[in-house]
Amino acid sequence: MSKPYWTKENFPISPTIRNPGGSLAFKAGMWRMMRPVIDPNKCTRCGICETFCPDMAISKLNDGSFNINLDYCKGCGICANECPVKAIQMVKEGRE
Amino acid sequence: MSPESIIVSGHRACPGCGPILALKYVFNTLGKNTIAHIATGCMQVSLMGGGAFPGGEFPLLIPALHTAFETSGAVISGMDAGLKALGKRDGINLVAIAGDGGTADIGIQTLSGAIERGHDFIYICYDNEAYMNTGNQRSGTTTLFAATTTTPVGKVKRGEYHLPLKLKKDMPAIIAAHGAPYVATASIAYPTDLIKKVKKAIEIRGPRYIHVHAPCPYGWGFPEDKTIEVARLAVQTGCWILYEIENGKLNVTLKVTKRKTVKEYLMIQKRFNHLTEEEIAKIQELVDRNLMEFGLA
Amino acid sequence: MSNRKLISGNRAVAEAVRLSEVNVVSAYPISPQTPIVEYISEYIADGKLKAQFIQAESEFGAMAACIGASAVGARVFTATCSQGLALMHELNYVAAGLRLPIVMAVTNRRLSQPLGMWCDHSDAMGERDSGWLQLYVESCQEVLDTIIQAFKIAESKNVLLPIMVCLDGFILSHTSEVVDIPELEDVRKFLPPYEPDPKYHTLLDVNVPMAAGGGCPPAYAMEFDYKKFEAQIQAKEVIKKVDEEFAELFGRRYGLVEAYQCEDAEIILVAMGTIVSTAKEVVDVLRDQGLPVGVLKIRSYRPFPKNEILKAISNAKVLAIVNRAISYGVGAPLYSDIAATTCNASHQPILLNFIAGIGGRDVTPKDIMTIFEKAKKTAETGKIESDVEWIGLNRTLVGG
């Protein structure tokens, strides 16, 4: 959970949030019920999963493979649904 | 995708949200020299804190203002005039973002005024076909027959019933009738098309309007992993046509080769579960007529 | 160097806006404000004022445009009244909450229904809790001077609240008086350009991105409102200071209140706007007759000048408070505010509540005489005739 943003030192005169990109402090991944898992053998590195992720949780690594940032992945499953080679499986989150 | 990513993770949009995808494509194409006004609605809450977050999260890397629900066109006009008066207008994209309610209903007056006066801004309407932020009440762009919380299916009345000549309120046509230099429709299922249109809009001066079809899993009643699929079906069935009108000239940007019947689009959504064969036929008739008018039959 | 000209209140507003070198004007026409926007349009068309004019499609569009322009750092002006002011109501709270120093001229006109073109203060009274500062003026000279002062007051770092300058519709807006119009160079000495700081102000700057006005949880809303409240309290000092600075350059001062013949007055008439001018004339006549009467002009209605009022009425037995507006179900606004000011004070004169001048009905010297007579009776008997006295009410129509 994120800390209170406005403090005595920085309380503004109007309701303004002055830390652009500060949402990164909120790990929305905690909402997740299902987790996407990419099968590296099937993945063709087309990048469609990254394109369609509403949470910017998928990114391309230096080696060209795609990585899902579980801090921010809400488990919507769009990536798995859209993957043209069905390389992504949605796995139930939580204790096995 | 532009290398300038100006929307980051940690926003509070629902899992599988359509509108946030629309804004992801739009913002990352517009880049850092952008000032936005975001009208009251799903995106204002998701991007600017609707009062639920003491943490003050802000997923954008550009300045954004929220004033009220109906004010998009007027505030962006003010920003345009203000920056012009201060000699600071050049090189800055002004973008007004609103949902379908904030565009076609409560916001139509200020939008119409801003377009008619010829202000210099880009307007993005993300269309999830209802007042989703408050829990799925019908709006002016709700598709005919759809069930919403204010047009529920009951014993006497069954779903949304507006004027039967149109599938939904045709905002792009209204804006085009104003004579805006650039009017376009887009869909989150076709990001390349949308990004191309935003890039084109950036280079044009005057009021530019892009209406993005952005399904909402929770409001429309489909699983949250099917958002793109539903948006794609809307285009493939002809319920949503991707086109642009540049200086009055119409150009259909995506011609569907193997068109599907509207039933495929409708039946995947719970909000259309109650439709009779007659009603589905009616929708097919309206879609066919519209396609004919676009020369796409 | 100065220019004395015979001009209307509306013309005085437009001249002041020109001299204040605003960047953006966004307004919608409504009687009796229309000449203001017409004159400003002429100045812009002739290049006398280098500003952007947004011909808004409605008043809420006008205020929203002002908010947008102010939020990017422009000096902004608008004008309206009556229905237009009411239509702006939602945005007025937004402007005040975002702490944007917008200046607005309000040519006070009653709110429908019943519909009327003419003056009363019902329109501005509806905005008295919005956080906007409200100054009520009584002459065309004061209109011009106060609009120029308004920019300086609003833009002060200790204030940063929008401000409305209220002039009685038609009575001042359309009446011509001799006005001393200052030179632009002299106004420039008084009023520096508006230069907001992104670290402090609500300012949309691509180099210092911020999200403004998106939402505020319960944990902080009260604190933002508290800061707004504090800003209004601080505005009292700023209004006085700006008044002094103005007086130094232009020789005219107005203050938060004007106590006319109040020092030894037993009966003081309290009012706002042009009623004060008439009352001053009547006070002169009554003083000649030996009656200890005075007029207290409330110029700054918001913030309410509690201390200045208590000082002015320290010897009075009776206050005859004349309201040009009604607060249904209880009485009248100015009366309530004065009552709140005196209720815990050590000196408590009797307060009489008069409603007059509603819907543009003239408040004549005879009416003022009537008010003083009633107040005199109360001063002698200690009795209050009624909770609310309706001056000039046509009893043949309504009975009672």
Image (cartoon, rainbow, N blue to C red):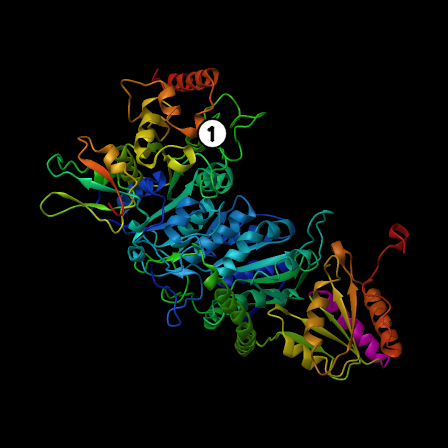
**Quadrant housing residue C195:** bottom left
Above or below for C301 versus B290:
below
In this image, C300 relative to C377: left or right?
left
Q: Residue at x 47, y 51 (%)?
A: C65
Asked which secondary structure carries label 1, the reply is: loop
- Crowd around label 1: few <14 · some 14–19 · many ≥20 (10 Å): many
Q: Which residue is mark 1?
A: B169
**Quadrant housing residue C390:** bottom right
Whether residue B127 can be seen here? no
Q: Is C353 in front, or is C369?
A: C353
Q: Quadrant of the N terminus of chain B?
A: top left
Q: Residue at x 68, y 77 (%)?
A: C309
Amino acid type at image mark 1: Lys
Range of the magenta residues?
C273-290
Q: Is C248 in front, or is C97?
A: C97
Q: Quadrant of the C terminus of chain B?
A: top left
Indicate the chain on which mark 1 is placed.
Answer: B
Find residue C104 and report its horizontal and vertical position in percent: 56, 59
Whether residue C64 can be seen here? yes
In this image, C196 relative to C230: left or right?
left
Residue placed furthest toward the front: A96
Find residue C301 and report its horizontal and vertical position in percent: 63, 68
Find residue C113 and report its horizontal and vertical position in percent: 72, 47
Find residue B3 and report its horizontal and vertical position in percent: 20, 47
